[in-house]
């Protein structure tokens, strides 16, 4: 999993851009898998493009933060996204990754 850590911020803001954090919060608060259109509409389409939402969802799935399952429907395939990690698990993973890169390991 590749995450860049920006130490000028705190918490998830160290790891994600504001709209990426909004996407994660939307999915954590959802009680079902979501398609990109619903995520985009849920976080406010006036704040970010749908393409940015789709790219973020795919990136988060590629790095293991989200689980993506394919659904075949009218018009082709759709990805259904659900969180694979909680906020705490993401922060722990990022911290352990940073320690590993620094040559230190949690005891």
Image (spheres, rainbow, N blue to C red):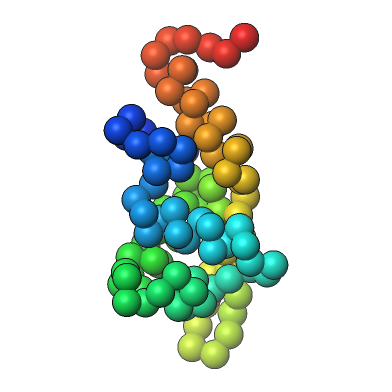
Q: Residue at x 68, y 69 (%)?
A: 32
| Left or right, residue 56 beside residue 75 | left
- In this view of the protein, can residue 75 be seen by the observer? yes
Count every numbered label the image shows and give the total. Answer: 0
Q: Is residue 79 above or below residue 63?
A: below
- In this view of the protein, can residue 3 be seen by the observer? no
| Left or right, residue 68 beside residue 11 | right
Answer with the quarter of the image where residue 49 lies.
bottom left
Which quarter of the rendered picture does the C terminus lie within?
top right
* Observer-nearest of 77 and 47: 47
Q: Is residue 57 above or below residue 100?
A: below
| Residue 86 % position (x, y) | 62, 45
Q: Residue at x 53, y 35 (%)?
A: 91
Q: Residue at x 43, y 10 (%)?
A: 103
| Residue 5 % position (x, y) | 36, 33
| Residue 28 % position (x, y) | 61, 58
Q: Is residue 14 above or below residue 29?
A: above
* Observer-nearest of 35 and 40: 40
| Residue 29 % position (x, y) | 62, 62
Q: Is residue 14 above or below residue 102?
A: below
């Amino acid at each position: 999993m590749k995450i860049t850590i920006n130490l000028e911020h705190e918490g998830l803001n160290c790891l994600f851009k504001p709209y990426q954090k909004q996407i994660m919060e939307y999915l954590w608060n959802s009680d079902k898998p979501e398609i990109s259109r619903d995520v985009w509409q849920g976080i406010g389409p006036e704040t970010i493009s749908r393409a940015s939402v789709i790219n973020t969802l795919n990136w988060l799935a590629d790095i293991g933060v989200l689980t993506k399952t394919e659904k075949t429907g009218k018009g082709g395939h759709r990805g259904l996204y659900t969180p694979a990690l909680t906020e705490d698990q993401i922060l722990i993973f990022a911290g352990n990754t940073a320690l590993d890169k620094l040559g230190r390991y949690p005891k």
